[in-house]
Image: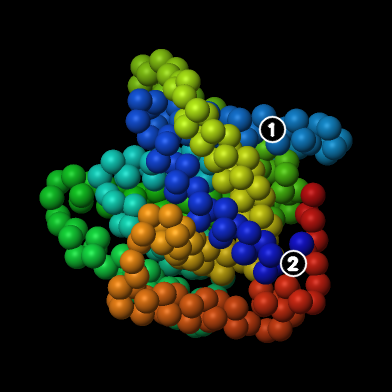
Amino acid sequence: MANFLLYTVTILIWGTTWIGITFQLGSVPIEWSVAYRFGLSALLLLGFCLISRRPLRFTAKDHLIFAGLGVFLFSTNYFLTYWSTEYLTSGLVAVGFSTLILMNIFNGVLFLHNKIEGKVLAGALLGISGLSLVFWPEIEAFDLSDQTFLGLGICLLAVLSASFGNTVASTKGGKALPVFQKNAWGMLYGTGFMLLYALARGNEPVFEMTFDYIASLVYLAVFGTIIAFTLFLKLIGNVGMERASYITIIFPIVALVISTLFEDYTWSLPAIAGLALVGVGNMFMLNKKPKDSLAAEGMQRPVESGS
């Protein structure tokens, strides 16, 4: 599958998961909803690996990588993101999460000894600025009250956790592991971490036996988790976590397009200008040597399966 397709499909899937997440918030504690989501994903992926006879035995060093993915990318990240929505609007959460690309750039320098690419940094700043314009009314309404400030802090901690997860996946050992098994084990560790957290808080299992909750859980587990993370981690391995994380700037735009079609969202002039900036930033991300660019990958050669 070409990088361009990996990029596009991941954006389209994650652009729709915001709808599903709203049905997960309510009577079920956040840690249990996250545990159910990644637990179901892990079981389905492990079953797939068994049926397709993919090896599931790995070294202790490999399991450290799986555990790192589980803690940072497949549990803490989502728990904190869900929690932040109790204090912030979805637009502010989207803008906060767009900083993932900056955190990935600097974590890449700090932990992976990557060099900062001027075009990538410029594209990141353009994209974040554009998304800020798109959600400007919500940013303008933001105040430093205790709750909103707390929500912003929680959101940024979620982004930092996601960036650490991206960094683990971008290490030499992380990229060498087959993606299906890597996700299966990582999600299993993430589920275990959330279960331990829930039990430590004294929260007994709660499940909402409604169509909306169950349907959204299945959608998030299968599409938003198994499929999207399989594509996203493949993309990280192919183009780097800095370029891959531009997805977090684009998929809120997809959510707004859906809102335009079904909820009568109206695009203001600042929002249209912001959309243009996001597009320009995306071009900066794609503007790399032909053999390495997303656009060229889409036209020239398939991605190795890695699994």
Q: Secondary structure at mark 1?
A: helix
**Residue placed most toward the observer, 251 or 165:** 251
Residue name at image x 38 percent, y 35 percent: 25
Q: Secondary structure at mark 2?
A: loop
Q: How many marks?
A: 2
Left or right, 125 with respect to 186, comes to: left
**Residue placed most toward the observer, 92 or 12:** 12
Q: Earlier in the sequence, mark 1 or mark 2?
A: 2
Q: Which residue is mark 2?
A: 2
Residue name at image x 34 percent, y 70 percent: 267
Residue 275 is situated, as x and y percent measured from the top left of the image, at 41, 75
Determine crowd level at label 1: few under 14, some 14-19, many 20+ residues with C-alpha closer than 10 A.
Answer: some
Colour convention: rainbow
Image quadrant containing the N terminus: bottom right
Q: Is residue 70 visible?
A: no
Residue 174 is situated, as x and y percent measured from the top left of the image, at 66, 52
Determine crowd level at label 2: few under 14, some 14-19, many 20+ residues with C-alpha closer than 10 A.
Answer: some
Residue type at mark 2 is Ala
Q: Which mark is residue 190?
A: none
Residue name at image x 62 percent, y 64 percent: 7
Residue 118 is situated, as x and y percent measured from the top left of the image, at 49, 83
State the separation of the CA atoms marked 1 and 2.
Answer: 25 Å
**Residue placed most toward the observer, 192 or 48:** 48
Q: Is residue 249 above or below residue 31?
A: below
* Picture quadrant of residue 293: bottom right
Contact between labelled residues 2 and 1, with CB atoms less than 8 Å apart: no
Residue 205 is situated, as x and y percent measured from the top left of the image, at 44, 17
Residue type at mark 1 is Leu
* Picture quadrant of residue 133: bottom left
Q: Which residue is mark 1?
A: 44
